[in-house]
Amino acid sequence: LRRRLEDAIDAREAELQRTELDRRLTEERVDVTMPGTPVRRGHLHLITQIRREVEDIFLGLGYTVVDGREVETTRYNFDGLNFPEGHPSRSPLQTLFLDAETVLRTETSPSQIRTMETQEPPIYIVSLGRVYRRDTPDATHTPTFHQVEGLAVDEGITLADLEGTLDYLLKALFGEARKTEFRTHHFPFTEPSIEAHVSCHMCDGSGCPICRHSGWIEIGGAGMVDPNLFEFVGYDAERYTGFAFGWGLERIAVLRHGIPDLRELWRNDPRLLRQF
Ligand code: PHE
């Protein structure tokens, strides 16, 4: 009796399942060719893209990419770079100190000293990363930004090599037509020193508040390595010469893409970032 009951239940259950399956196959048909819900793909931040692009440009020229440290000692951030005692950059009004001998690096230049301390010439390196300054934010400044540092040390390196290299970089980043120029300048760690300027991205040279009506925006410094640095790291300053440069990646980004305000790059509004 039990077996008959169980068989009847099983048969009925199988029948119900078949009916339900038939119902679903007819009623719940899906059109697999219909488009689904789109999932938006993310992408690298513009600064990361430029960072990688600059690295690629220099890898193509035979340079090596080296890492620096965001937390530095005053020995590498100032002493090794020939900053005299009492230089304004050594003041806590300009630099973020963690303690008397430790700072958030104010530039990527300490990587020059760290590289030269551990390697012999010839040296051809770039080092990219974040730097920190007690700057008041405005359209062309933020207290945290990114730099690319370059250093070449070899026999017979001249200012012409520096200008040729920077010219190549400018053309790679901005194209042949963009107006650029070098001006004399001063840095404690280079002699002579130059500063590179690119025509303003907002007025294209006619003058506006962002370029302070000059038509130009500074993109970074450069120069021939001061022999005092070679002495600091124990290089023969009679035998070797070198050049160095340090440029801002945010400046490259705004100048190239016509972004009106560099602070936009730190707001991370997807409506801006999506455009790059
Ligand atoms: N470190 C300098 C700055 O941040 C730029 C620079 C680097 C100048 C290397 C000369 C050589 O302003």
Image (cartoon, helix red, strand yellow):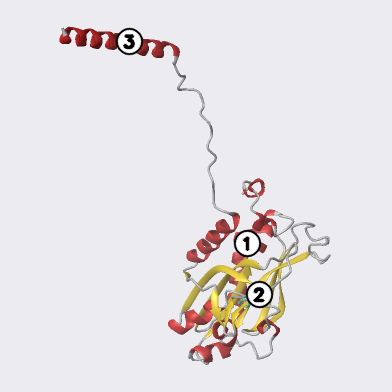
Q: Residue 85 at what x, y percent from top left? A: 66, 91
Residue at mark 2 to residue at mark 3: CA–CA distance: 81 Å
Residue at mark 2 to residue at mark 1: CA–CA distance: 17 Å
Identify the secondary structure beneath mark 2: strand
| Side of 17 relative to 204 (left or right) | left
Mark 2 or 3, nearer chain start: 3
Q: Which mark is residue 221?
A: 2
Q: Which mark is residue 16?
A: 3
Task: Tell me what residue is drawn at x 40 percent, y 10 percent.
Answer: 23
Q: Residue 151 at what x, y percent from top left? A: 54, 76
Task: Decide if ligand 1 comes within 8 Å of the CB at mark 2.
Answer: yes
Q: Which of label 2 and label 1 is nearer to you?
A: 2
Identify the secondary structure beneath mark 3: helix
Q: Residue 272 at what x, y percent from top left? A: 66, 49
Graded by Cα atoms within 10 Å as few (under 14), some (14 to 19) or many (20 or more), the crowding at tag 2 reads many
Task: Tell me what residue is drawn at x 74 percent, y 56 percent.
Answer: 260
**Front residue (pair 100, 124):** 100
Residue that label 1 marks:
171
Image vertical order of residue 75 relative to residue 200, above or below: below
| Side of 133 relative to 108 (left or right) | right
**Front residue (pair 26, 169):** 26
| Side of 141 relative to 16 (left or right) | right
Task: Tell me what residue is drawn at x 70 percent, y 84 percent.
Answer: 88
Answer yes or no: is residue 200 visible: yes
